[in-house]
Amino acid sequence: MIGGYIGKILFVNLSEGKLKDEVLDEKLCRKFIGGYGIGARLIYSWQRGGVDPLGSDNILGFMTGPLTGTDVPFGVRLTVVGKSPLTGGWGDSTAGGDFGSYLKFAGYDGIFFSGASEKPVYLFIIEDGKAELRDATHLWRKDTVETEEMLKTELGKGIRVASIGPAAEKLSLMSSVLMSGRRAAGRSGIGAVMGSKKLKAVAVVGRAKVPIASSEEVSKLRKEYVANMKRPVVDMFRTFDTVAIYAHSGDTPVKNWGGVALRDFPTANLISGEKITDSLESRYGCHRCPIACGGHMRVGTQYKYEAGAKKPEYETLAAFGTLCLNDNLESIIMANDICDRYGIDTIETGATIAFAIECYENGIITREDTEGIELTWGNHEAIVAMTRRLAKREGFGNVLADGVKVASERIGKGSDKYAMHVHGQALPMHDPKLNPSYATCYQSDPTPARHMQAGLAHFVENAAMKGAPSGLDVPPLDRYTYTGKGKYEVICRNKNHLLNASGVCYFSQYVLPWDWLDKSLSAVTGWQLSPEEITTMCERISAMRQVFNLREGLSPKDFKLPGRAIGDPPLKDGPTANITVDADTMVSEYYQALDWDPETGKPSKKRLLELGLEDVAKDLWP
């Protein structure tokens, strides 16, 4: 097998309790790399359109990349894939930690689950690629921390665990999968797919080595890149001292996207990275990571979370902080801990709470509806209380438990105008009114409203942080010019797919030169990839994720940003006053640059054939 791959995938039929190994085809790897690239290709081939996301026919996958588990800096990621119960389209979510690395050490590049078990089970993969399904009845209803501790007691301290919490067991559409080290595959509601299959956890242990084409070259590159990382950016990621700065600049949304920080949230500094650092107990990092951005918090005083609760990251701080006008840091740590333990996405949860607060403030819901909880702006006790009820599906929390879109449908009374989502997925915490290219990815990616799929928007941030050109063939562009950006969005988005499919942390692009990934991928796999071949690989991955949605009946008209996110109507004050973003033009030009029809989202038959997707071309163009 080529370097970077174990060369084996495990297929698990949960309905029949059968496990089967399959060889990972080298041609498949060369075409789709790994992660959601291989995941989308395989699931599209195996699964018919129109299946129930929470039904037994929906296939769930855990897929690594060729750099996962190697000595390449940031080679830690694993992607969970399947049809999203949150959006009804393609779903994927990546996670760090060390579970992905240890899955490969245990002898597999990936696992795919079909069917559904009648009773709770977990999969245990023992080293050397031996695997078995075991009863998980005793783990059902346990939170993710308890589940991992119980499995380590049963199986040994050296195991790594991916598990769901009680929220996924109750099929919350915003539920996530938690990996060892409290790293979450949080978006797309992918945890609910595990819950629907009665799959409580996957535990792995192993000591296998990932084969490397040139260990000497990998070691040389690692030393070179780690020694020359952009230290100010590294420090920023370690402290995440960004919320106050980003809020006041107009990047972080405030008051459910309707506010301005300087006016509505002047105390943003109280939830800054500096304040978090003051409360840290210890730091930790993902497998072989040179940054170590994770942290464990000291025991709470006002809120009684245990010592070791995970440090909230930027998106969580913004979702439970600026979005809700909440400057109580301990309450955000508490809410984050609840989300981790019950297994729900912090972005979706914070956005849903902010939506509920605005409904409460406008009389759409009342104190009687919320059972006495006063959902007012900045009321940190109410925010924590409702987060807990949402996680447990208790009382009014059950109304909110499936995300902002479903909550607005249940509440009615015109509440949809306060629901900030794209086709069911809540908006992340970067405002297109400051960096308009975020609008392109929020509205065009098959997993909508995903900041980690931003292309040109991250290029702008990257160049600003590094203080130098990125090395991509992209000229300086005016943020508020909405034409002429499509081909550059494609270039930057292709780099995203290369990062994600290779199993690399997204932060790497901010601290390393842009050519580091191409060189590292060649050193690990032995492939000598031309720029043209890399472009084709990445656009092939783009097309597979897109055609999955097309087969589900989705089109560009289904993915539209709410007016507040693009300044329609524009804000009257603040750093993004009088800005209205022309998202439709940018998305249309992006589609055209890929040779996709802007109205239907369909890739042209010519382009599909050029990408070697003959079967897909027949499906779309019979």
Image (spheres, helix red, strand yellow):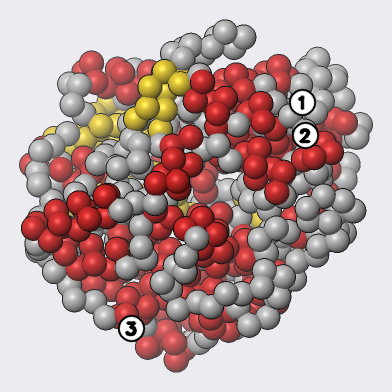
Mark sitting on residue 378: 1
Q: CA distance from mark 2 to mark 1?
A: 9 Å
Looking at the image, residue 159 lies above or below residue 481: above
Which element carries disc 3, helix, strand or loop? helix
- x, y percent for residue 433: 73, 59
Q: How many numbered circles does the render carry?
A: 3
Query: Residue at (70%, 49%) from the top-left corner?
Result: 249
Q: Nearer the viewer, residue 538 or 262?
A: 262
The local crowd at label 3, few if under 14, some if 14 to 19, many if 20 or more residues have their Cα within 10 Å, is: few
The N terminus, quarter of image:
bottom left
- x, y percent for residue 109: 21, 52
Query: Residue at (16%, 61%) from the top-left corner?
Result: 524
The local crowd at label 1, few if under 14, some if 14 to 19, many if 20 or more residues have their Cα within 10 Å, is: many
Return the residue at label 3.
532
Looking at the image, residue 303 lies above or below residue 564: above
First in sequence: mark 3 vs mark 2: 2
Which element carries disc 2, helix, strand or loop? loop
Query: Residue at (68%, 80%) from the top-left corner?
Result: 483
Q: Amino acid at mark 3?
A: Glu
Q: Is residue 311 visible?
A: yes
Identify the image quadrant of residue 534: bottom left
- Name the residue furthest bottom: 606
Q: Amino acid at mark 2?
A: Phe
Q: CA distance from mark 3 to mark 2?
A: 48 Å
First in sequence: mark 3 vs mark 1: 1
Return the residue at label 2.
265
Q: Amino acid at mark 1?
A: Gly
Which element carries disc 1, helix, strand or loop? loop
The local crowd at label 2, few if under 14, some if 14 to 19, many if 20 or more residues have their Cα within 10 Å, is: many
Of circles 3 and 2, the one toward us is 2
